[in-house]
Amino acid sequence: MTLRLQLLFITAFIILITFIMACLPSGNDEFASAKEIIGMRNIGHKILLSSGDSVSRVLPIGKINSNQYQISFGNALNFTPDSVIKIVRQAVTANQLPKDYIVNVIDNQSKQVVCGFAVLKTSKTNLLPCKGRKQPKARYTVTITFRKVSDGSVKKNYLVAAGGGLAALMLIFSGLRWNHQQKKTFVQSVNHDNTEMSNAVMIGRYAFHQNEQILMFENEEIKLSDKETQVLNLLAQQINIVVARYELQKIWEDDGVIVGRSLDVFISKLRKKLNGDAAVRLVNVHGKGYKLEVA
């Protein structure tokens, strides 16, 4: 994996983790919940006082779910819905609780709702059906359900997280595509190089590449000089056939010099470079020339 691809993956990972962390519940949520529970106890306390009871206690607040609370009392009490409406409104304002809520007062014995009202965004949409009717003394439970204002922000967080995840995926895709393109380019380059060297003449276990002036023996690359390449090319064209000495000496005619020993020197050099394969021999045929034998 290249350094560039590694950096892309690291960046994508950091982006993804950052946006996931943005969606996780924060400590502020726990604080707000604790604050709401205190607000519920305060409501229960004031309801008891409004009924003339300063001795009974408010039982532990029940949290039914994230936006619904239950207020219970140690003893029976009587109340007027008007006082409950007023107390809840004051508590909501004082404790900065969600402005939209529904209150139900339940008779513990019959399990029936004896009083209920809803306060919504505007006074025109408020539902206050039980005002002015005093309720008899009994054991009651008050449930308050809030419409959470944080829902929009939660959705926003999820949208932001989704955007971050998409950005991370795009980075990863971009990195993979770039890596694939690099590999493709490399393979094309290799194939191109192999194509250029595909016209090799096999001499036993040797691959003779005339244009590149090299012999390949297994993984070893053996360099050839210009004259060595020309001599070997003539011999390789007629493997196991004697090539006349004068034909080989024509290689030096273009230089304007014909030296008998020059050919012998280059033949000797070629023998050394071909000695890796016992099946390949450069044979001197006395009085005629040289033969490249391949068993």
Image: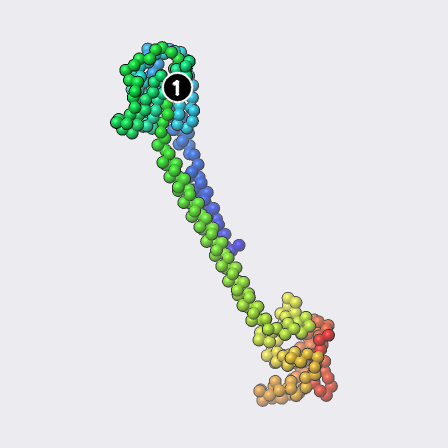
Q: Is residue 243 left or right of residue 146?
A: right
Percent position of residue 34, x then y: 40, 26
Q: Position of residue 24 (x, y in %)?
A: 44, 36
Q: Quadrant of the C terminus?
A: bottom right
Q: Nearer the viewer, residue 245 or 147?
A: 147
Residue 128 in percent (x, y) is at 29, 21
Q: Which of the colour schemes (rainbow, by chain, secondary structure, one colour) is used?
A: rainbow
Residue 152 can be seen in this image: yes
Query: Which amino acid type is marked by label 1?
Result: Ile
285 lies above or below 120:
below
Secondary element at tag 1:
strand
User: Which of the two residues, 78 or 223, is positioned nearer the viewer here?
Assistant: 78
Q: Position of residue 54 (x, y in %)?
A: 35, 11
Tell me which residue sits at (41%, 45%) in the image: 163
Q: Is residue 76 above or below residue 223?
A: above
Quadrant location of residue 145?
A: top left
Residue 284 higher or lower than 84, as above or below: below
88 versus 26 height, above or below: above
Which one is nearer the viewer's eye here, 291 or 214?
291
What residue is rendered at 32% in x and 24% in y? 118
Res. 38 visible in picture: no
Instruction: Identify the residue at image location x=28%, y=15%.
Output: 132
Q: Residue at x 61, y 73 (%)?
A: 200
The image quadrant that residue 214 belongs to is bottom right
- In the image, taking residue 228 as reference, residue 102 lies left or right, namely left
* Neighbours of disc 1 within 10 Å: few (<14), some (14-19), many (20+): many
Q: Which residue is mark 1?
A: 71
Please tell me how many numbered marks the rendered image carries: 1
